[in-house]
Amino acid sequence: METMDVSPQYKATSLSAPSPTASYIACFAGARLQIRSLATFELVRNIPLPPSHDVRRSQIAWSPPSASRSGAATPPRRSSAPSPRSHRILVADDATTRIYDLRDDKWNAVVSNGSGGMGKNVTVEFGRDEDEVLVWSDFASRVMVWCLKTGRTVDIRDPKFSGRDSRGWGYRPCSEEQGVGGRGSMLALLCRSPGVDVLVLLAPKTYAVVKRVELATQDAQGVRWSNDGRWLAVWDAASVGYSLCIYTADGHLYRTISRELPDELSEWGIEGLGIKTVEWVPGNDWLAVGGWDRRVRILSTKTFSPVVYLDHTAQICVPSAPVFTEQVDARGFRSFELAQQPATPPKAPVEKNDTGHMKQGISAMAFNKDGTLCATRDESTPTTVWIWDLRSLQPKTIFILHSPVKALQWHPVYPSHLLIQSTHDSPTLYLYTAQPLPSSTSSSDSTSGPPTILSLADNITKPAGSAAAKWTARWLNTEPDKKPAMVVGHQQGYLLVWPEGKDQILRFEGQDEDESDDSLYDILTGRTPVPPLRDDAWGRSHGSEDGGEDADVTGAPSMEGLDSTSSFYDTFREKREARSRGMSVFEESGLDEMF
């Protein structure tokens, strides 16, 4: 894009980790943990790690967003509530977990694995809030829940999975009133018992067993809460067949879902493999199930019966949806061309000692924020991306890339932006922007064009050494009034990309993001020092005071040599001069509105 902006490349020794609310980004720089502000790109914290910490085998995790404010509130506050953000970050290797707080430079916590009798630390995550840390041991032997306030622990034995990608566990989602992006209280965890799958529901804080349910599955592959926290979906292994169990929030089996009778069965009456992926559609009405039969079934949460089928065919013949094919010339220049239908996308290559049936099924499903668009990838045609319009219940457009698709990510705020990442050796991304579908017209009246190709090879260097670059890309969860941004990087560096250009940062002199209406109360009660008077003549001669940690202080004059006493005297001297000129002393502070 012509308006694309790219930040300077930041060197790192590990992949970057942006915070959930896109306020900060963290990475390793040698033996240090560096945290930058995504608003000013300034270095907020530069934390040295001990020599015993293994940076190469480390992982970074942010705490769930929370809206915290120091100090007591004063009546009444006219400003809006502070936006939630993550305040704590953890760094974990195989033996030790270290937690740091961005609000207090002196606070830190260390969670040690001890003798390591239960194996190494495999996965470390924050729990329901910033005061809880979950540590999974090797071989899925146990989960340790650490409370950072009291230091007490809860030992949960025999989880079925190691906790990666939230597989086999999840907190019940909370409502928007409890906090944006926050987590609920009850924890659902898949455990293993001799020959039986067990679903355990654990109470908040104490993690006492609320419900222990023996599942009707033979080999459960995951558990997933619905968006409203009313349902739990547990699906069986694909080798067992098509089996999906729906449980209520209190652990009662509501319904067991099987596939409709297929038209073709083998001579032994075996119908084939079952479920491969399960995703809840944004909202509270639909559940999507991707199967090995190359079909996506969308179930209604009222009856949990299939209402829509999204079939992926080996030969594409959809007159209402354009098919774009990526072309690469001898110079490496990439472009998209409109393909004629029927089009046959390339199939997955069959490797040695492999069968074509193993590379099959819906391996990726991604829904946009409002649940109107869905992007899918079939394993048998790994270079093809299907974009489905769930309002017209038909494909909107289809892309055939040059390399297999690696990830599909819709923007968390903008429902029309889709980020496509493929298995390129170079940092090349594809940004698809969907055109809105008017409710009064058919889908053929609003066709979308091909995705925009973002080539970032000139902006970021490949990692040093012989190791191949492991490119990663993800959207930043920016606010709705901000332009979309993404972070792209490899194991030794990262950069920030704004496909539509940067936002113009407007900051007023002396403004602080945590400033509230009770600042005058703090001054009058002596809780904060009295600031200098901010008129034009006085400000030009004395400068301004630092507005806080996140304030933009570029070019701010120094305040050395100015004590609180002289500031207090100058403030009220100007008030006396204003009274002599016939002005109200409350005009500047705004207190005249109260009388």
Image (tube, rainbow, N blue to C red):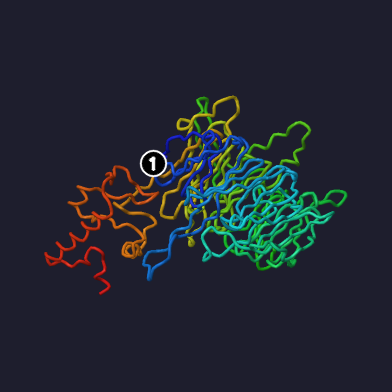
Q: Judge whether 394 appears above or below 305 on screen.
A: above
Residue 434 in view of the camera? no
**Left or right: residue 179 compared with residue 117:** left
How many other residues sit within 10 Å of disc 1, few (<14), some (14-19) or many (≥20)?
Answer: few
Q: Residue at x 27, y 44 (%)?
A: 557
Residue 65 spot, x, y in % from top left:
52, 56
Q: Residue at x 69, y 48 (%)?
A: 136
Q: Judge whether 422 appears above or below 433 on screen.
A: above
Quarter containing the N terminus: top left
Q: Residue furthest front?
A: 565
Q: Nearer the viewer, residue 83 or 551?
A: 551
Residue 372 spot, x, y in % from top left:
55, 57
Q: Residue furthest right?
A: 268
Residue 316 picture quarter? top right
Query: How many numbered callouts?
Result: 1
Q: Judge whether 497 appears above or below 547 on screen.
A: above
Residue 454 in view of the camera? yes
Quarter containing the C terminus: bottom left
**Left or right: residue 340 compared with residue 544:** right
Q: Which residue is mark 1?
A: 3
Residue 348 picture quarter? top right
Q: Nearer the viewer, residue 398 or 549?
A: 549
Q: Residue at x 65, y 52 (%)?
A: 134
Disc 1 residue type (three-letter): Thr
Q: Residue furthest bottom?
A: 595
Residue 191 spot, x, y in % from top left:
76, 55
Residue 534 spot, x, y in % from top left:
23, 55
